[in-house]
Amino acid sequence: FPVERIRNFSIIAHIDHGKSTLADRLLEMTGAISKTEKNRQVLDKLQVERERGITVKAQTASLFYQYQGETYLLNLIDTPGHVDFSYEVSRSISACQGVLLIVDANQGIQAQTVANFYLAFEAQLTIIPVINKIDLKNADPERVENQIEKVFDIPKEECIRISAKLGTNVEQVLLEVVKRLPPPSFNRAAPFRALVFDSNFDHYRGVVANVALFGGCLSKGDRIVSAYLGKSYEVNELGLLRPDEHPTEKLFAGQVGYVIAGMKEVKEAQIGDTLYHQKHPVEALPGFKPAKAMVFAGMYPMDQSDYSILRSAVEKLTLNDSSVTVQRDSSMALGAGWRLGFLGLLHMEVFNQRLEQEYNASVIVTAPTVPYKAILSSPRLIKEHGREEITIVNPAQFPDRTLVREYLEPMVTGTIITPDEYVGKIMSVCLNRRAVQKNMIYIDDRRVMMKYLFPLNEIVVDFYDHLKSMSSGYASFDYEDAGYQAADVVKMDILLNGKPVEELTTIVHKDRAYSAGKAMCERLQDAIPRQMFEIAVQAAIGNKVIARETIKAYKKNVLAKCYGGDITRKMKLLKKQAEGKKKMRYIGTVQVPKDAFINVLKRK
Ligand code: GDP
Ligand code: MG
């Protein structure tokens, strides 16, 4: 396939602005899929994506398009829109020469539109702005075009107005992709060189690597080497993704496709790795910045006998999602498990859901924590760690104040875009979360973009939900890393009848410990059902109790309803109760519903 007739592009947008819907339309129009209801959002392959209606993992599809009597090969890479997954976006972008930047004609530019724009802009890609959902009653494409001109400095004449849902003007999008985007400029006569930009684990065939060819060509049976490990493999299968795998005999420079080469292990298909022919070693392509975990949580099997099942599930899932970091961990209360690092809370919830759905694993997850740092003062600890500065991702290992010169907490720069009537409310909530305003501009006569410096731990669990509910869903939020800052933090334990609940140990700012402890106790009081005895719910710092609530006793005899000797009925009831208990965790003698843990961390 001649390189001049190849276009590699990505669709980027704020969540729900219509990426997946547009991808479906493009696939239909080029005949890759048929026009049935069943094929709605075909690129959202994971069960969790279909359930939540979000895209988590970028997917790839090759389309054939006729233009002026010639066939063009258009490689489309769908990307996720949520802030937690911007890592996936930058990966997809690295295989492209251009992007379609979708903006909802009603909502206008949102926080992730801005973040995604800069990813594409910094990668020097051609950006085609597309205004979607022009069929909506409140659509105002004119306003959105003005925003695009003002915020991104793209002439508004370049915008394409479409309705992905109805298919209006979607043909124009394909046309402009061919006309405006440059073909990839790679040499087919050069030695073979390919970038691994994604990989999936298949139970039967091992690793399926998604690759973009930056030079030469690849054939079935070739011997290739992965630059990272230096191991060599024979190519068993290769082909295009349309979006299902279509085996071919060869792949050429400029193309995007998949390769199966007998890779069996997690480490063998490093994302960002370079593949080359064994006989023609080449310099590795610049890899990716490794994803930086922002949220850490402990994960343990509900039942220790499930440890090995869970271990293999965690291994397989992390192969599919290289942005999760994994460390072995163990705890007195919870047994052997892992400490996992995620890009954000949604990322963590999606990971748990995938573990439970795709691998049928039942897990306990501890309160999420952000990575704090401590500058040690204790010579003993410094010697033990071999350095002064340590990173703490597990509250159980939080060093005592007397051993520390200074604690540091991670900071982020947050971007909020909102209609101006909510500005006052949002400012006071930000203040409440220890944020400092950096700037504020009007992006049109009604919408405001604000920048704040936030402590990460103030936003990680529930800020986004809070912002949404207080702005009737109109405000959007995105954030990026902004280094570390000194902070006065303490470790807070939660006790049930005097027994610490390890899942709920958190690190909190000293000034907020009292209110955070009180709120946690109140929420736990609501989340734990009454039991046969009274339960004291306490928050404590060291030995000092700072908050307390009481759950009153409740007398209930489930067998009282069974008269006479109806033994089967009695057994049924007992069985039902036992099943209910499986979803319970015991803290001492207190039963706690498993889903209570994450819920009690969310502020109202
Ligand atoms: P994504 O998160 O960017 O992938 O967005 P989706 O493609 O999943 O779309 C989000 C929602 O917007 C879905 O309910 C779509 O049906 C709807 N949607 C997408 N495009 C259009 C459009 O052109 N018009 C209207 N009215 N709704 C649309
Ligand atoms: Mg989507």
Image: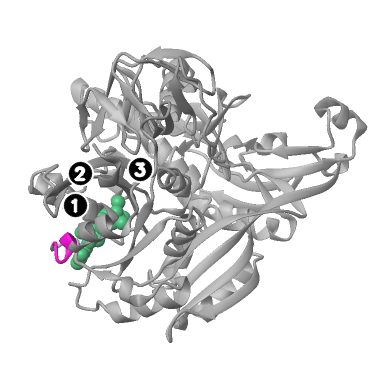
Q: Position of residue 297 (x, y in %)?
A: 56, 37
Question: Which residues, given as a range, are shown in magenta?
Answer: 167-171
Asked if residue 583 can be seen in this view, the reply is no
- Majority SS type along the magenta span: loop
**Left or right side of 225 for 450:** right
| Nearest to N terminus: mark 1 or mark 3 | 1
Residue displayed at 52% across by 77% down: 425
Q: Nearer the viewer, residue 457 or 443?
A: 443
User: What secondary structure is found at the residue carrying circle 3?
Assistant: loop
Q: Which mark is residue 58?
A: 3
User: What secondary structure is found at the residue carrying circle 1?
Assistant: helix
- Classify the position of the N terminus by image quarter: top left
Report which residue position mark 1 lands on.
26
**Residue 144 among those drawn in magenta:** no
Residue type for callout 3: Ala
Residue displayed at 41% across by 76% down: 149
State which mark lies toward you, 3 or 2.
2
Whether the residues at callouts 3 and 2 have beta carbons within 8 Å, the answer is: no
State which mark lies toward you, 2 or 1.
2
Whether the residues at callouts 2 and 1 have beta carbons within 8 Å, the answer is: yes
Q: Please identify the quarter of the rendering in which residue 293 is found.
A: top right
Number of labels in the image equals 3
Residue displayed at 15% across by 48% down: 70
Residue type for callout 1: Leu
| Nearest to N terminus: mark 3 or mark 2 | 3
Q: Position of residue 273 (x, y in %)?
A: 49, 29
Report which residue position mark 2 lands on.
63
Residue type for callout 2: Leu
Q: Is mark 1 within 8 Å of ligand 1?
A: no
